[in-house]
């Protein structure tokens, strides 16, 4: 898989990485994998969701503060996340949601490799690798002046695009196994010990708009309601009745050519017929994509 190859390629570099993809595709797992395979693996991995905190709190969390910096400031001050990530990796999730005022401060840290706490008057050197992630098109945000162009180019040195789950259904069996193995040390939480291949095959035929997060939700629900000891095909089909948007029409007579044609058409539509982007998502060259489209047009 292209994502795994990129992870291994980028792990030993110390450059910044921008991870893109829809919500729920596992971008933080990619960031964690890069860190774990890097020379900084023995250092801290510090993650923050830029969309989860109000601007004032996010600023103090990122940069820290000195005692008395503001009303309610902790006695003795507080380390910021940049300091906590020293000699390790800082992961900035939902970077597109970072307020413009904080974007300027982040840019300075990236340029100077030093941070100044709120209320402080001295700089603190930091040695960190910054990984960031977004489900937005940062280039468009730059055009609308909602994201700083200079920060965008600082963050987008290396890039990994995490495809939507519907584009990599071949990964679903492995993902299901990983999800099923969660809480294995506490078997009393669920009587389910496994899932049949036929049940997994049904899950592969679904359109997971919520991606891995939605798959996890369905599996966790199945672990609670299935009669056991394993999740059967009938359990999955009954559960999917409550998830109508997931179900897709099953056509046993679809050939591999038909399936490939539909996948290419779907991705071209999603990319507004940008062949370069569509080829990247399909993991093929632009020339190969053109050839496949021409072959399909002549065949149909």
Image (spheres, helix red, strand yellow):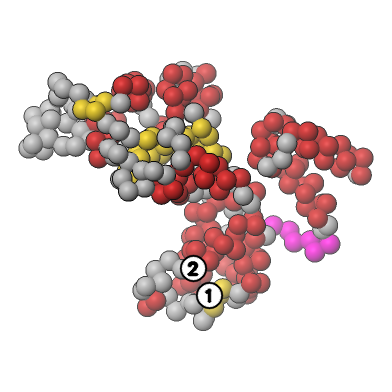
Q: Is 140 placed above or below 184 here? A: above
Residue 194: image tag: 1
Please state which of residues 127 and 74 is positioned toward the viewer in this rendering: 127
Q: Is residue 101 visible?
A: no
Q: Residues within 10 Å of mark 1 (few under 14, many from 20)?
A: some
Name the secondary structure under disc 2: helix
User: Which sits in the foreground, 108 or 254?
Assistant: 108
Disc 1 + disc 2, Cβ < 8 Å: yes
Considering the numbered disc 1 on the image, is that residue within a helix, a strand or a loop? strand
Who's the residue at 59% across and 59% down the image? Answer: 172
Residue at position x 49%, y 68% from top? Answer: 180
Which residue is more in the foreground, 186 or 90?
90
Residue 135, which numbered label? none
Horizontal side of residue 104 vs 274, given as left or right: left
**Quadrant in the picture for residue 284:** top right
Q: Is residue 223 left or right of residue 294?
A: left
Marks 1 and 2, the one that precedes in the sequence: 2
Horizontal and vertical percent position of residue 286: 74, 33
Q: Please say if 232 is above or below 43.
A: below
Magenta residues (range): 246-253
Does the magenta portion include 197? no
Q: Position of residue 194 (x, y in %)?
A: 53, 75
The answer to whether 283 is drawn above or below residue 56 in the figure is below
The residue labelled by disc 2 is: 180
Main SS class of the magenta portion in the image: loop
Residue 235 screen position, x and y as percent: 58, 73
Q: Residue at x 56, y 48 (%)?
A: 4
Residue that appears at 86% across and 42% down: 296
Q: Indicate the quadrant containing the C terminus: top left, top right, bottom left or bottom right.
A: top right
């Amino acid at each position: 898989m292209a994502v795994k190859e990129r992870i291994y390629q980028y792990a030993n570099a110390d450059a910044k990485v921008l991870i893109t993809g829809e919500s729920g595709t596992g971008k933080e797992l990619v960031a964690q994998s890069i860190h774990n395979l890097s020379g900084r693996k023995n250092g801290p991995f510090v993650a923050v969701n830029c969309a989860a905190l109000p601007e004032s709190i996010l600023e103090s969390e990122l940069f820290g503060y000195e005692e008395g910096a503001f009303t309610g400031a902790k006695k003795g001050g507080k380390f910021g996340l940049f300091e906590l990530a020293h000699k390790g990796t800082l992961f900035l999730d939902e970077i597109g949601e970072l307020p413009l005022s904080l974007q300027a401060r982040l840019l300075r840290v990236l340029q100077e490799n030093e941070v100044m706490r709120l209320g402080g008057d001295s700089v603190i050197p930091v040695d960190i690798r910054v990984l960031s992630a977004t489900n937005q098109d940062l280039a468009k945000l730059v055009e609308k002046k909602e994201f700083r162009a200079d920060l965008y180019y600082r963050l987008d040195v290396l890039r990994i695009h995490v495809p939507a789950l519907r584009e990599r259904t071949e990964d679903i069996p492995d993902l299901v196994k990983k999800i099923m193995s969660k809480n294995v040390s506490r078997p009393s939480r669920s009587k389910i010990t496994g899932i049949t291949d036929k049940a997994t095959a049904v899950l592969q035929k679904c359109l997971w708009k919520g991606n891995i997060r939605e798959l996890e939700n369905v599996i966790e629900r199945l672990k609670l309601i299935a009669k056991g000891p394993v999740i059967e095909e009938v359990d999955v089909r009954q559960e999917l009745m409550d998830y109508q948007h997931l179900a897709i029409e099953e056509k046993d007579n679809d050939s591999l050519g038909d399936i490939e044609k539909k996948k290419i058409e779907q991705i071209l539509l999603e990319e507004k017929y940008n062949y370069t982007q569509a080829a990247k998502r399909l993991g093929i060259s632009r020339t190969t994509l053109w050839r496949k489209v021409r072959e399909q047009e002549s065949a149909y």
